[in-house]
Image (cartoon, rainbow, N blue to C red):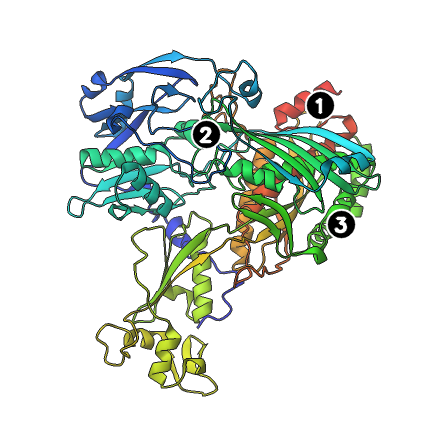
Amino acid sequence: MSPGLLGARVRRNHDPRLLTGHGAFVDDLRLPGQLHMAVWRSPVAHALVGRVRLERALGLPGVVDAFDVNAFGPSPPVFATVVSHESLKSCPQFPLAKDRVRYVGEGVAVVIAETRAIAEDALEQVEVDLATLDVVASVEAALAPTAPRLHEQAMDNICAGWTIRLGDVEAAFKRAHLVIRERVAMQRYTGVPIEARGVVAHLDPISGELVMWVSGQWPHTTRTLAARMLRISEDLIRVVTPDVGGGFGVKEEFYPEDLLVAFAARRLGRPIKWIEDRREHFLSVVHAREQVHELELAVQRDGIILGLRDRILTDMGAYVRALGFVNPSLAAASVPGPYAIKDVLIESAAVLTNKSPASAYRGAGQPEATFARERLFDIAAHRLGIDPADFRRRNLLPADALPIDTGLRSVDGPVRFDSGDFTLALDSALRVLDYPRLKEKQAVLRRQGRLPGIGLAVYAQITGSGPFEGADVRVSSDGRVTLVTGAVDIGQGLATALAQIVGDELGVPMQDVIVSCGDTARIPHGVGTYASRLAAALLEIGPQDVEWRDGAASVRGVAGRSLSLAELAEACRPGASQRPPEIEPGLEARFYYEDDNPPFAYGVHAVVVDVDRETGLVRLERYVVVSDAGRLINPTIAEGQIVGGLAQGLGGALLEELVYDADGQLLASSLLDYALPAARHVPMVEMLHLQIPTPLNPLGVKGLGEGGAVGAHAAVANAVADALLPLGIEVRTTPLSPARLARQLLAHQ
């Protein structure tokens, strides 16, 4: 048996298959009669759509079909938001542009052909009349009095606006000895999974069921949205997510292509495939992060924070996608962070621009808020002459204040810090760094003309937000256990972690636990039975006298009287003579865990950098992470997730940016233009796990997949800012790329 699987450093069970080239991704599907889809995308950011001529494309050999939005009939389906707000205005996007395009890359027409190459060639034969309109490519341009209106419902190009108020902010600022005002901005960037998006759809000619294979993160929601937009029953759609080569939140969306492939498969009665190329990815995948924070901090001379104000402008792009509202909502609720700030005023506006729509990307608003707050706190500490670590320590919520309901709330849930010790996390990171000695070394290096920097960031993040997830556990007659869940393994090791939980709970070896993720047809209807009830009947004792021990149902206090899982499963088979009549056939259980009070994880990132005076290159010398994600199921997987998120955070701090010009043209639409961090950019990470369990779920676990990204952007930016402090160079925006820093360093010589 396998006791103690929880907390064990078990190797991921799917890795051998993937590493030996036996993975099965969407693009690996080759169905008989399969056709390929390509999308004609707008080359301009804002224009009226006139006549769409498809005749020449249809005349190309190998082209089977071509259509525009009119193929859907007089009332084409509209992409609706899944996460909403009372202030959110309707800014509908159609599966193909209707009357107007609003960003470069928006789909206008579709070509279906025998091969992808023919389909792409046919796109050159599509003719679309576009009458260009004025473009707004920034929130400042969108809010200008003379800006063109992108949607009739949003007269001022603000699609949502709201205010969060705690306490008496005006009184707090009147008591302040110092008020610090700063404008901090984070650039637009996005997730770049190694596998781009892809969809294959096939209409089963016998059952009439539409089967969709999607490289995505939420199969059941995809099924719901596809059914709604195709105007058919959910029972007629099956969504399968095969192996997924990374998601990072950008695949947790319902995209126009998802619907277009499904629609075309039903329209033609043949399998349709669409695989995104990298340029399409940059043009039309959901973007994220682009926010402006206009901050005000009221402080006493001793560094105690009295009040905080923030005006947040979020660049939403041209439309509000299914999860688009998550970014500004989580950002607004996350600005105060794990600090004891009683008086808060946050005004938030979601602004429409002529760019690809924004939506969730690893952390979804929390990295933005953490960067703004932690950058502001470093500035405040410097102006007060207080060490940045001491400034944070004086203002962090103490451990004895937890649990605490801050009064803040996002669309994901209330901000209630349920467990933990923020000060312990900070002091632990400083201890690992040997902070006093490090500060002394920094002073010596500065006298030598070097530019060393130390950066800190303390963060808290909502995790495991529901509203629910479901799972089935079934035991076969040979004792093997199958777990079926609606959650998806997108490379984060979910299947391994779930196998550890089941194996630990039931006392079976991990190799006997089969985990099936991401298939809407695999979770059956009906309710099974539990092992204790059945075992009590077979052992002729009361259920209260049954205990689960060493992978078997045993009589409490009696050695030698037990039934294995295999024996119980065999006894549960339909027609089995030993099955009591009141017990349903089959040894299985189905459970939905509903969660309206998600736990908060938190952590501290501490970074040491060295900035090259000549080139502006930032070298990361040390990186310390202290994380509290509650009880860890698998520390190795947890640490891999932290490092992966950290890489994306430092990529945003130093390299990545989706640059648009004033005409709304994306200037970084390939991996030649969009700089991603490589292995050489990611340092060895020194990690410490506090593992303070949450009381909010039976396992005491908190999420951690996004924490690396939430803390890294702010910590790295603070470290670079600290390195440049003696030169008087201020850091208010990112990325802090070598070219940008080199220009600033040259100007300060």
Residue 297, given in percent of the width and then of the height, sits at 74, 35
Quarter of the picture holding the N terminus? bottom left
Q: Which comes sooner in the sequence, label 2 or label 3?
A: 2
Apparent side of residue 544 relative to residue 110 in the rendered image (left or right): right
The residue identified by callout 1 is 745
Task: Please say whether residue 527 is visible from this viewpoint.
Answer: yes
Residue situated in front as seen by the camera: 84 or 515: 84
Three-letter amino acid code at the position of disc 3: Asp
Instruction: Return the residue nearer the eye: 469 or 650.
Output: 469
| Residue marked by disc 2 | 357
Q: Secondary structure at mark 3?
A: loop
Q: Who's the residue at 52% across and 23% down the image?
A: 659
Is label 3 in contact with label 1 (beta carbons under 8 Å)?
no
On residue 135, which mark appears?
Answer: none
Q: Can residue 646 be seen at all in this image of the molecule?
A: no
Residue at the image position 73 percent from the left and 26 percent from the top: 729
Number of other residues with Cα within 10 Å of mark 2, as a class: few under 14, some 14 to 19, many 20 or more: many
Instruction: Judge the density around disc 3: few (<14), some (14-19), many (≥20) Cα neighbours within 10 Å.
Output: few
Query: Of discs 2 and 1, which sits in the foreground?
Result: 2
Proximity of marks 2 and 3: CB atoms separated by less than 8 Å:
no
Q: Judging from the image, what secondary structure is the residue with disc 2 in?
A: loop
The amino acid on which the numbered mark 2 sits, given as a three-letter code, is: Pro
Q: Of 80 and 681, which appears nearest the observer?
A: 80
Please determine whether, in this image, residue 215 is positioned above or below residue 268. below
Residue position marked by numbered label 3 in the rendering = 434
First reached walking from the N terminus: tag 2 or tag 1: 2
